[in-house]
Structure formats: structure tokens, C-alpha cells
Amino acid sequence: MLQAVSRLSRAAVRVRRVAAQVQVTTVTMAQNHQSCGASCQQNGGAVTAAILIIGDEILKGHTVDTNSAFLLRALRKLGVCVQRVTVIPDQQEVISKEVALLAPQYTHLLTSGGIGPTHDDVTFEGVAMAFEEELHAHPELTRLVEEFFGVVDRENAAMKLAMVPRSAKLNYGTDPQTGQPLRYPLVSVRNVYIFPGIPSLLERAFNGLEHLFAGSGTTFHTREVR
């Protein structure tokens, strides 16, 4: 009988210890979350960003989104405070509404996916609609599409890649490994940077254009919770 009571007493002590550890961990995690959010709010001059992931395949679970994780890490290293990540379908109206909502709120809006030759690649159309612009065949992009895809017919589906909002800007990055200019540009419209959805292409484009997003020297500190 005494042995049973002793075992119960030891078990109760272990439970109290575990409960105390859980409480400390929960408080620490809450403090980390609050300090991370406060670091953006306290620095009024902080460079901020939102990430817009576009793709039905993401929402259906057919494809795992690795682009947002890469961008979150990369932007944080540059001192950029990412405050929002949104995943939306390949629908022109939805893209337009999200771009119109997010672009004015943040220093940068980075989109991923929805650019290509197929019928459901409508990111350029959505961005154009958000800013009430028309699409037009950009002469330089037209030449690049012809060069990269061997297209001679202007009616070819690949030419959709050259149809961008009228105020679009072409940003040529630098390959960090070779120091050579990247041959294909990243399209941007105002503060919206339109990245491809293929992870290897997105990462290459971002790494070559880091200077466009660098923050104002802000450093974010992360405390690991064990």
C-alpha cells in the first residue's frame, strides 16, 4: 500500500514538472511572436512585404508550396518584415482583388505562379486589372520569347509570356555564382514583383535581384524554443 502511494506521489511530481515546462514554453513562444510583430511595428521605417502564392495546384494539395518558405527566409535575411502570406487560385478576378488590396499596404508585393503559356496562367492579366491597365506585347519580351522558345509565329501560345501590363518594368538580375547578367528578366509593375512558380526559377531570379528588396539595415533576432 505504501509503495503504491509512493509511486502515485512520484507520478504527480513528474506531471507538475511537465506542466511547468509546457507553461514556460508557451509563454516563451508567445513572447517570441509578440517581439517579432513588434519589431515591424516599432520601426516605422521598416521595409515590409506581402507574398501572394497563386495556383490551383497548391490549394488542391497537388503541389507543395516551397516558394513562400524560401521567400520568407530570404527576405528576413535582407531585413524585410514579411507581414502576410496568401494563397489564391488561378482566377483573374481574385488575383486582381488581392493585388489591389495588398500593393498599397506594403513596400513590396511578391507574387509567385500563374505566368506561362496556358489558359490558366492569368497573373499578368490580374495585375493589369488591379491597376486598370491594358496588356500589350512588350517588344523586348517578344524578342526574348522568340529566342528562348524558338517561336516565329506571333500567334503561338508562348507569346502570352510577352503580354504584360503597359507600365511593366523588366528587371535583369545577376547570377551570384557567375557574376553574369541573367538572360531573362523579372517583370514588375509598380511595387509588385511577378515571379515564376517553378521553385528553381523563382530562387534564381530572387537571388539575382536581392538589391531590389534589401531593408534599411534592420536586423531581426530569433530565439529558439527548445
Image: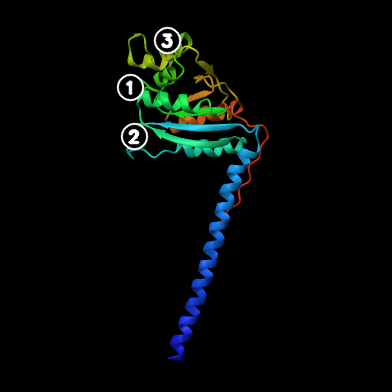
* Rendered view: 163 above or below 219: above
Within 10 Å of disc 3 (Cα), the crowding (few <14, some 14-19, many 20+) is some
Which mark, by number, is residue 57?
2
Residue designated by label 3: 137
Q: Amino acid at mark 2?
A: Glu
Q: Amino acid at mark 1?
A: Thr
Element assignment for label 1: loop
Q: Amino acid at mark 3?
A: Ala
Q: CA distance from mark 2 to mark 3?
A: 28 Å
Element assignment for label 2: helix
* Rendered view: 21 above or below 86: below
Residue designated by label 1: 118
Placement of the N terminus among the 4 image quadrants = bottom left
- Residue visible at 52% across and 16% down in the picture: 169
Q: Residue furthest right?
A: 217
Q: Are marks 2 and 1 in contact (CB under 8 Å)?
A: no
First reached walking from the N terminus: tag 2 or tag 3: 2
Q: CA distance from mark 1 to mark 3?
A: 17 Å
Q: Quadrant of residue 145?
A: top left
Within 10 Å of disc 1 (Cα), the crowding (few <14, some 14-19, many 20+) is few
Q: Are marks 2 and 3 in contact (CB under 8 Å)?
A: no
* Rendered view: 6 above or below 117: below
- Residue visible at 55% across and 36% down in the picture: 82
- Residue visible at 61% across and 31% down in the picture: 47
**Residue 220 coordinates in the image, percent (x, y):** 63, 42
Element assignment for label 3: strand
**Residue 194 coordinates in the image, percent (x, y):** 47, 24
First reached walking from the N terminus: tag 2 or tag 1: 2
Q: CA distance from mark 2 to mark 1?
A: 14 Å
Q: Quadrant of residue 41?
A: top right
